[in-house]
Amino acid sequence: MSELRKDSLSFLETLGQSVANVSPTLTPALSIAVVAGSAGVGSWFVYLLATIAMLVVGFAIARLAQKIPSAGSFFIYVSRTLGPSWGLLSGWSMLLAYLTTAMALTVATSIFVKTMMTSLGIAYTPPAVLLYAIISALLWFLSSRDIRFSSRLGLALEAVSVVIITVVCVGVLASHGFAPDMKQIHLEGLTASAIPQSIVFGIFAFVGFESAATLARETRNPTKIIPRAIMATALAAGVFFVFTSYVVTMGFADDADKLSKSASPLADILSSQSPIFTAIVYFGAAISSFACALASLNAFGRLMFSLGRYQFVHQSMGIVHTTHKTPFVALAVGAVINFAVCVAFVNAGSETDTFGWYGTIASFGFIVVYLLCSICEPIFLRRTGEAGVLDWGLGAIGVVLMVGSLVGSVYPVPDYPMNLLPYIFLAYLAIGVLWFFVLKNRAPQTLLGIEKDMEVGGAS
């Protein structure tokens, strides 16, 4: 049976997976509008808190990635520490997280392409369904090629888009004489109750920063390169998010209500500028969001590959392409589901609405796994005699931050339909738990095999 291509990725190629999965330019181009709806001019502060939270969680994930390099990443980390039942739950949660991230970024790419065409004065607006089909097909085609190609492509696309957005932000600061925005600095209007709700979507800006861990079998010296890639991505992305959210809010003259209603914040800021320049900006945003969707599908495919090899899902998910050494069946399944769900909800609301729905559900999936990793890291290291005060302290802080984020998503009760999303996520988890018990009764040897593999330390 073919295996993933081992020891083929450098630090930059591994970093490209995490950076592309974060899609830094997505925040100033679209996500900031969702956060501003609840956090107002305090949006930059929400991103600062999210950065701290992700650095704390990133420390735990990086330590686990260093000790347990595996394509199954979180599924393996949690299984080795808390047992296969918890590991399978984390893998199930992460599958949804990566896939709904791909959906959110498919919708975002559609939004950006349309904005770019409008700014160029093109009267024709392609149907969303057509764009979803093209995007999903390209995602499958590119992800099924050599992972080195898609990682390099993702990093290159992100570098271009980040430079474009940075130029725009510097221009906004210059137009305000580089004077400090005191309303934002004083967090005017930001209430304590708004922070937990807005931080859930603030965390969504970072989700995928840990996805380099899924490339453990394909990375050279993974015990060093992957932890470095994870922490570097969290820190660099956090600085970029705080900076750009501050500048975009300034560009809207601190009118958070207007910002929250904007489907294209950067286009609105640049409305007085050359339409060509606006088109360039949204071309950068489109390639950034597409690169993120590609990285999300890559991570989904490798996690599905690991679960397929353990037969938690159909074993065909564990099949690897003989030439490209990629889990092409799992990737095809992900691309088809991505297209089908996006089309199913194409008329359920505006694309900005569906982007927010998919992103919020993805955040729940990531937060659950981040929570489990924060619990597992000090426990696992205690067994090896390596746990220190820092491991226990940051692990505890990570647990508090992730639990707080989950509680904040349900109370105070958000508006419809956002109030339904936590329960949709719980229903999905319940399906995974039910499947676990079905598997336990029908094929107990599968779980016994996982337990044995965890005991001998075999990586998937």
Image: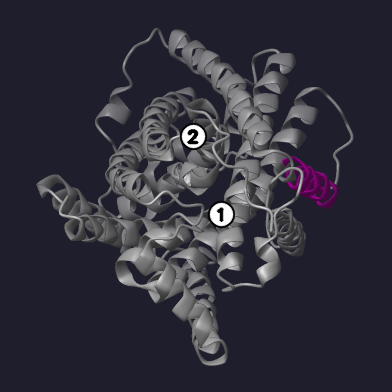
Q: Residue at x 72, y 22 (%)?
A: 279
Element marked by disc 1: helix
Please name the amino acid that badge 1 sits on. Tyr
Q: Secondary structure at mark 2?
A: loop
Rendered location of residue 318, percent (x, y)? 65, 62
Image quarter where the N terminus lies is bottom right
Viewer-side residue, 421 vs 298 = 298
The segment highlighted magenta reads 128-142
Q: Is residue 418 magenta?
A: no
Decide: is 87 above or below 245.
below
The structure's colour scheme is one colour
Label 2 neighbour load within 10 Å: few <14, some 14-19, many 20+: some
Give the residue number, with chain letter if any, for mark 1: 98
Task: Tell us which disc is closer to us: 1 or 2.
Answer: 2
* Residue 49 percent location from the top left of the image: 29, 41
Image coordinates for residue 264, horizontal then vertical, percent? 62, 34
